[in-house]
Image (cartoon, grey):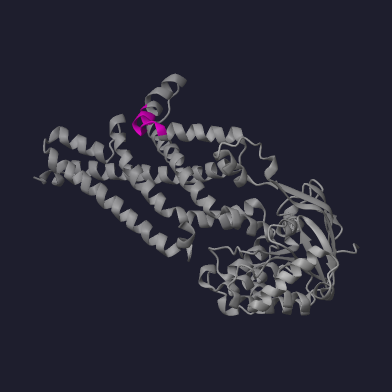
């Protein structure tokens, strides 16, 4: 039995910024585009044990989301290994669909299936991936919606819900398969400020139930209360790791200190 | 003026002509939808040779008159290959292949508006690409494509008039046959035009109703 639910070993991921390249060419610049390659993940390693709640934060564009997507193999790392339990996902020939079925993923921009109701969104994978019979899939989907308190939206389509409701349905969709871990990519940052509260409350509930979670977020009060470990990520690397108290009192690195000052000022101003 | 409508033989020609027009349009538009969907998927996910082959196919069928394609299929191809093929079958095929060339574009366009985020969402819950295409992408793309598909239906219906010039008695063919016996040019074409109009507007109305009924809530925002 593996010690970790999920582990990243020396993961690298770069991508070419096609748009940047295009504008350059439109300007008549003949640069080969090599300059525009973004190194989003540079030698990042991370271990997550069952029941862990870890929070990644850092400046936007630093590659946090790319790293999270690599963990779920929604982006394939250039180098390094991703383990889900004992299974190495970066080995050729691994059934990634099967692996992803054991990982819950919550998107910043929610990405619900637009043609399905909330219930349909949660049910689809239960039917198609877990192959549950109709009745059982429905029961489990309703239970997942109840868990995040959006039962009243069960028959609404994504466009008919508020952002906060939609994101909670997104969480229910990730939860319903009882995944080994849930990865959340800035689950509140695309929501109106007054709607983030309900999503944060849902995440607090999950935390209380011992759900294993890795969350990219800048919700600092939430981080202080819930996270066991905070990970400061900048320019494609993990700069500093420690308990919330370390970051809120005295971060070890100047870069983290700077960032915390800025983010705390912003929060208190609001 | 419209006495010719009372002639049972003319009536039969008109009814048979309408049936042929309807059959070939529906067949063409459905084969076009199936093949167009496959071509759209192949064009999105295929490698370069596949994309080039599809582009050549589409340019051929969009870039030459349907009448020429029909003529080639019915008279030239069997002669070159030195085989006997049912003309009607070849005509059906040409309409399907022609429509697929247009519908590939409509399908690809509507798939591309939703593909990015919805494919990721599908993969993230453990579905394969094919499962996501089947249960998420295509059900949305088909709903989005209905208005373009209705246009394609109207245009293909009118294109069936070319059948009369390769020896079939479609609606226009029926009109021509009637005119040979009866020189009432204006009344005959008025009747033929009215039948086209009734069929096309009736079917379009039906598709509009289906579109409204099946529309994905909030899809207008996406299409802006």
Please name whichever residue, B5 or B206, is drawn nearer the observer in this view of the structure: B206
Q: Nearer the viewer, residue B4 or A144?
A: A144
Quadrant in which the N terminus of chain B is drawn: top left
Residue A158 located left or right of residue B195: right
Q: Residue at x 65, y 77 (%)?
A: A269
Of residues A74 and A122, the one nearer the viewer is A74
Majority SS type along the magenta span: helix
Region of the chain picked out in magenta, as a range:
B63-71
Q: Is residue A179 visible?
A: no
State whether residue A124 is above or below residue B34. below
Image location of residue A156, percent across then percent down: 53, 73
At a point 14% along the width and 47% down the height, the residue shown is: B6
Q: Position of residue B178 (x, y in %)?
A: 17, 37
Pick the residue in front: B106 or A57.
A57
Classify residue B123 as left or right of residue A246.
Answer: left
Quarter of the image holding residue A197?
bottom right
Residue projecting furthest to the left: B1
């Amino acid at each position: 039995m593996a010690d970790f639910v999920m582990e990243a070993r020396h993961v690298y991921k770069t991508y070419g910024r096609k748009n940047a390249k295009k504008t350059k060419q439109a300007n008549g610049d003949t640069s080969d585009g090599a300059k525009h390659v973004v190194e989003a993940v540079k030698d990042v390693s991370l271990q997550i044990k069952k029941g862990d709640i870890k929070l990644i934060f850092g400046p936007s564009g630093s590659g946090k989301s790319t790293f999270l997507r690599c963990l779920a193999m929604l982006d394939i790392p250039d180098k390094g290994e991703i383990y889900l339990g004992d299974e190495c996902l970066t080995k050729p020939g691994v059934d990634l669909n099967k692996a992803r079925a054991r990982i819950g993923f919550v998107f910043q921009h929610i990405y619900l299936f637009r043609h399905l109701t909330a219930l349909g969104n949660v049910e689809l994978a239960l039917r198609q991936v877990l192959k549950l019979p109709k009745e059982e899939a429905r029961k489990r989907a309703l239970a997942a919606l109840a868990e995040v308190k959006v039962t009243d939206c069960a028959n609404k389509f994504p466009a008919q819900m508020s952002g906060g409701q939609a994101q909670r349905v997104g969480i229910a969709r990730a939860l319903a398969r009882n995944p080994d871990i849930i990865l959340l990519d800035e689950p509140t940052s695309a929501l109106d400020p007054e709607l983030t509260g309900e999503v944060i409350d849902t995440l607090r509930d999950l935390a209380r139930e011992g759900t294993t979670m890795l969350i990219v977020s800048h919700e600092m009060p939430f981080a202080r209360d819930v996270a066991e470990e905070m990970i400061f990520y900048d320019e494609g690397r993990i700069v500093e790791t420690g308990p919330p108290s370390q970051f809120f009192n005295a971060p070890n690195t100047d870069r983290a200190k700077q960032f915390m000052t800025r983010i705390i000022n912003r929060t208190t101003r609001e | 003026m419209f006495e010719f409508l009372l002639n049972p033989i003319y009536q039969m020609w008109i009814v048979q002509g309408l049936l042929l027009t309807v059959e070939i349009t529906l067949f063409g538009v459905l084969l076009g939808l199936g093949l167009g969907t496959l071509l759209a998927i192949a064009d999105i996910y295929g490698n370069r040779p596949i994309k080039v082959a599809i582009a050549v196919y589409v340019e051929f069928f969009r870039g030459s008159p349907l009448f020429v394609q029909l003529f080639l299929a019915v008279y030239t191809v069997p002669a070159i290959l030195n085989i006997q093929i049912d003309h009607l079958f070849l005509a059906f095929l040409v309409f399907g292949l022609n429509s697929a060339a247009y519908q590939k574009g409509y399908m690809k366009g509507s798939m591309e508006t939703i593909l990015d985020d919805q494919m990721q969402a599908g993969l993230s819950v453990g579905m394969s690409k094919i499962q996501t295409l089947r249960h998420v992408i295509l059900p949305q793309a088909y709903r989005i494509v209905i208005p373009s598909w209705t246009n394609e239906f109207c245009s293909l219906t009118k294109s069936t008039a070319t059948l009369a010039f390769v020896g079939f008695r479609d609606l226009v063919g029926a009109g021509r046959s009637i005119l040979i016996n009866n020189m009432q040019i204006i009344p005959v074409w008025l009747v033929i035009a009215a039948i086209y109009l009734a069929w096309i507007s009736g079917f379009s109305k039906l598709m509009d109703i289906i579109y409204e009924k099946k529309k994905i809530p909030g899809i207008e925002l996406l299409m802006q």
